Image: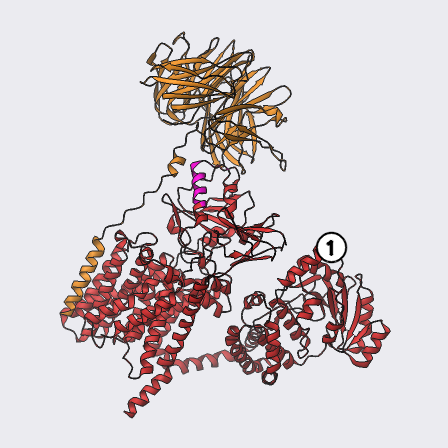
Amino acid sequence: MTVRMSLETLLSEGETTASVAVAVLVHDIESLPGSFDALERQVYGVAAKYVVGGGEEARRIASDRDAVWLPSVRELIAAVPESVTFIWMLHDRARPRPDALRSLVVESYRVDASVAGSKVLSLEDPARLDSVGMATDVFEVPYSGLDPDEVDQQQYEVVRDVATLPPGSLLVRRDLLRGLHGIDRLMPPQAATTDLCQRARLRGARVVVAPSSEVLYPTAGRTATVPWREEAGRIRAALKVYSPLTLVWLVPTAFLLGLVEAVVAPLVGRWTLFNFVRAWAWNVFNLPTTLAARWQARRGRVVGDEELFRYQVKGSARMRELVGQLGDVVRERLPESESAGLSGLLEAGQQTLRSPNFLVGLGVVAFALIATRSIWGGVLPAVGFTLPPAASATGTLGAYAGGWNPAGLGSPAPLHPSVGMVAAAQYLLAGRADLTAAVLTVAAVLGGAIGMGRLLRSWRIGAVPAYLGGIVYVAGPGIQALAGRGEWTALLAAGAVPWVLRVCLRRWPPTMRGRIGVVAAAAWLTGVAAAGLPLLLVVPPAVLALWALLGQGARWWAPVRAAAGSALAVMMLFPWFGVTDLYDYLEAGPAAFWEPWWPGAVIVGVTGVAALAGAGDRLQAGVAGWGLALAAGGLALGRLGDFGAGRDVATTGMVVAALGVAAIAAAALEGLGRIEKLPTGRQVLTATGVGGGALLVASTLLLAGPGRAGLPEDLYRSALRFTGIADDAGAARVLLAGPAEMLPGEARLLDGAAYRVVAAPVPNLSESRLAEPRIGDEALEQTLRAIIGGDVARAGEALAPFGIRWVVVVGPSPFEGVFDAQLDLIPLSGLDRPVFLSEVEAVRAVATDGTAWEWEPPDYFGVAQPAGRVYVAENADRRWGPEPWQQAGWANEVSAAAGEISFDAHEPYRREAITAAALFVFLFVVAVWGTGRKAAVTRARRKAAA
Amino acid sequence: MRRLAWLVLAGALAAGAVVVPEPEAVEPPGVFEIAAGRSDATSFAGVWYCPVAVATLERDTLISVAATERATAAFTFPNPVPGEEAETARFELDAPGALSVLVSDVALRGDAPGLIEFTTRSAASFAEVVEEAGRSGDVCLAAAPKVWYVVGNSTGEGERLTLRLFNPFPEPAKLRLLAFSEIGIEPLPEVQSITISARSWRDFPLDDALRFRDSLAFTISAEEGLAFPAVLVGDDIDTASWPGTRLADTWEFAAARVAGLTPRLVVANPGEDDLTATLDVFTAEGGQEEALTIDLPATTPTVVPLEGLTDAPFGLRVRASGPVAAALIASGPAGLGGTVGRATQATTWLLPGGDSNPDGVSTVWLLNSGESQATVTVQPLGVQIAATKLIVPPRTVRQVIADAESSGYLVESTAPVTAGWTAEGPEGVTFTAGAPLTDQ
């Protein structure tokens, strides 16, 4: 922001011609005169010329060419006068075209960039494209995306943000270069350039490539860079810029990938082991300087890792290249090798493949992957409460920790714990929203199935029926109903519930460490479940109490442990828990009335009764009875709407029923292995149970078929895709109307008709749950009443102050037709549903001079205006700033001086959120410490000693 | 034993789940009833659309606006030329108040259909075109149904007929036009499917395509967008225009006869079933119920000559056995006039206009077709003239001679009545329906 402001200042002062100093970086002394020749042809005059490096010979040439010789970039920064705006750093082998510098300067000004690079063409064949800026992967490996020998047809002639630039021609703001302490002299050129770009970006600077600026660079005999130095430089660059949390996973991953490459690369004729070892050793040796440089690089940063991730490609560029090379090799050699390889593999795995445990385990994994294939293969559908994580994990975490709740017209009320949980996972997954949704969904389905299987195994149910029961748990009638309502976070929560039960039912450890570990594990898992669906806090103690009452075996302490876990888990739900009224929470949403598919319910009942009555032993009967009671109880819970129960009660009922149906299916199928030992009457019952269990297992195909984990088909992405046509779609809101169950998350009601406001182009998870209506919500309701009541003929104008630019009717609604005869709403034709575009340019935040400000949740950004004001269409709250804040009707008006508008966090909520997060981490650590393998070994040793 | 306990517990829970009552659904509409119940005569959003306005050196339009409370009337005359801004003007109205605006003062560019946005819903608007060839006009339109019916048209010798479709909205309107006459449904392939550009209008001269029809009716259905229809008719003596209307079982015409004109009623049954209708005639002396019974064949407009019913000025009520559209046309040596009826009675009416006829006589008509006596106050607007108070006995019609300077009238009654007005002058005759402010 500092950079942006100063550029704007420059412009406002009327400076139209930037003063540029050129610095020729000497790598090949013989090329230096040619470089000066090219410089003299530049149409844009330079204020001063410098030659950096190269020793006495370079000093002499510099003297001949009226240039100043300096030994290093550090001296260059000190020597360049303050009147100079940009420094053009040119490699001596580069041959810029006459307008190269002019293009760089013009484009830098135009897009407000602080670092700009040229397009690089081959000197030997100027039609050949060498580089037009580059992305990198997260490990700082450049990825140009160009084909070898790609011809320059000006196909990339657009100025765009890039992760790194080729080092041959760089235009850098002098003050930025000074602030960054120049180029890292320990790095080779490309790594140093990448490092410079990353550090600049951390300071909020834009890094762009200006393809209209062309530089020729010799392809043959390039400045030789030792490969391990580049690799070492990349590691150092990563260590300097990323946050500690990113480094926690990045460093070991980078190490492992390097190792894998070192092992695999010889297959394609490359030897990277020594480079790998030297690069890491070099970094260990230089760690002190790296840490010092890191401190300098991260001090004064204004953006987080996510801003760096934005310009990076997914995965590992080197691995991608390696796999491609391997593929080529395999394709070349397959005819000779395929037969022997495959048969060998089959022979080796034959025994394992025959094992039913292996098969059912493989089946569970395969099922989970198949049932979620649309999500991990694409994107999470956006429908109901299933909304994708927000683009910025840090922004969402900030909002969760006392920041601004962006749902509807906003509120300072705390966000739902599910938002915090998903954002935390997203942060750990490099901020990637789609990846987070995929990982969490697969983990929930797979974890739920395995957890249920292991729970059932602890009741001596065989592996096959137990894991089939696990599949029924995550894909049977209960979860089908739950997921069918679009309750994605509840689906994630359900994945943790069986694990809580299993932990609480485990044998009570003899050591204090083990006991603490069990309680911590129960609390942590309950916290995970309750974050997705808070009412699940009571489910483990309740269902375990039921088991304790009528079940078998050592069980009496299980509900107590679960209750202790729930009590601890409550603290992880703050700050949301602290402000939520229990009764309001239980009654929130549409009245609970789960209408199951009744023939299916009958099948569940018959199967349960048959399994219960036909069970060969008491434990199996207990599992069947417990399942039967939970299935019936869950169904009853899901239908308590007449008693005031709301949406979460119904959803909780579905989870409970899912547990029950899974237990029934497993107990029923378990009978198959024992049927021969039973008397005839029980054999009939068992056979009936087995048949029912098989039907329940078969029913899971209904969920697996579409591959969305049972979630409904996407609605909002497709319904709101049209908003993406607008360049500034994110700066405006959409008013959605339709049946409450078709609207994203919670809806507001206007005389029974549901509507809600969401951000364009697609609402995210943090918008799913609406806070209590505030002044703006009431104003919107009054406006809608006026529109419906006929007092308003220009609805677009009336809705514009709310930042509403589009109106979309997603389903049958009394609102349908209300917007038909408005004088400033244009119905958009060719869409699946009624959609209206306002003729009034509506945005969420607009300055007094009429310019729109961008919304980058949770903050707003725009052109700084020292005396300007900005109208911010969020519910009025004096914590919006910068000062002076003023209430503008129901909204806010703040100063435009800083170019940024943000909400000051509510400190008590922030402290509570941080405490909850700390407890979450602490419980996890304690759980691992107390229940891990080492603890088990310790216990075993003590037991043996005793 | 435990198995039994599990069974009993599960059975009890299952029974509970089955018998638990379904929660009562929240009854929706409240405010939405307003949307559903809007009539075509009551301004729904304080916006009135005047399709017939025109302003040239030879012809001009006087748009009169009236409101019962202090309000701003914003006039907008969309320019059909792409990229051209609409002409606009704003005027303040007292409470109650009325004023008249010459379209040429705002948009002197030929045809200029426009709209008037009031800051109150208690307002109404009237447009009257005055030219050498005659005067024509009626109250402007407020509601925008998807289907319009335009009745009362004919293309006899010397008669001109133009259908105007005005789309004031920002999206194109795709319309389907169906014409039917005394000979049945008329094939009109060239205008069957019509697109009216956004904020534009189109005129369809139909007297050549449908020559020598005694009675013509049009059904205009909106497939996309909305539009407002009006017909502009003329003969050798005068011109007239009236807007489209919707369907209703009952129609009332406060003024059905003025001196020198021969009135006729046109009732169109656009449905697929034959209907019947009865005509009730009301004079100052009293009412004659079921003065006439007529058959209304399906998809046919029926012309009912009204001469001979009574020699006195009279009002009229039509009661049909199903939904129909109706219009009253009067022609003769004194001129040509036409108006659509009112399907609703009300205790408060706004009658904008009246000051466009300085050389003639304007008359306010009050029809009380009910069983209760109505005490009616007729308050001239826009001038400092005392109100006229009169009693309208049940089942009678009364006339009040209007002041030539008044830009409109506010009619308030103790019982539901129907109000309208007529203007007779050297340029011709105008029939105008009033705008009810409180539906009955």
Chain containing the residue with disc 1: A
Q: Which residue is mark 1?
A: A14
Task: Return the x and y of residue B218 as percentages of the image width and height.
Answer: 47, 25
* Residue at the (43%, 64%) spot, across then down: A908
Circle 1: residue type: Gly
Q: Is residue A798 left or right of residue B306?
A: right
> At numbered mark 1, what does the secondary structure look like: helix, strand or loop?
loop
Please check the rendered image and state whether residue A897 is part of the magenta-colored stretch, yes or no: no
Q: Is residue A625 left or right of residue A913?
A: left
Residue at far bottom of view: A945
Query: Residue A714 falls in which quadrant of the image?
Result: bottom left
Task: Return the x and y of residue A700 as percentages of the image width and height.
Answer: 33, 63
The range drawn in magenta is A779-793
Please check the rendered image and state whether residue A780 is part of the magenta-colored stretch, yes or no: yes
Task: Return the x and y of residue B400 as percentages of the image width and height.
Answer: 44, 13
* Residue at the (82%, 78%) spot, across then down: A59
Query: Residue A517 falls in which quadrant of the image?
Result: bottom left
For the C terminus of chain B, the quadrant is top left
User: In the image shown, does A3 or B92 lie closer to the viewer?
Assistant: B92
Chain seen in orange: B
Residue at far top of view: B311
Query: Residue B6 falls in which quadrant of the image?
Result: bottom left
Chain seen in red: A
B271 to B26, vertically: above or below: above
For the N terminus of chain B, the quadrant is bottom left
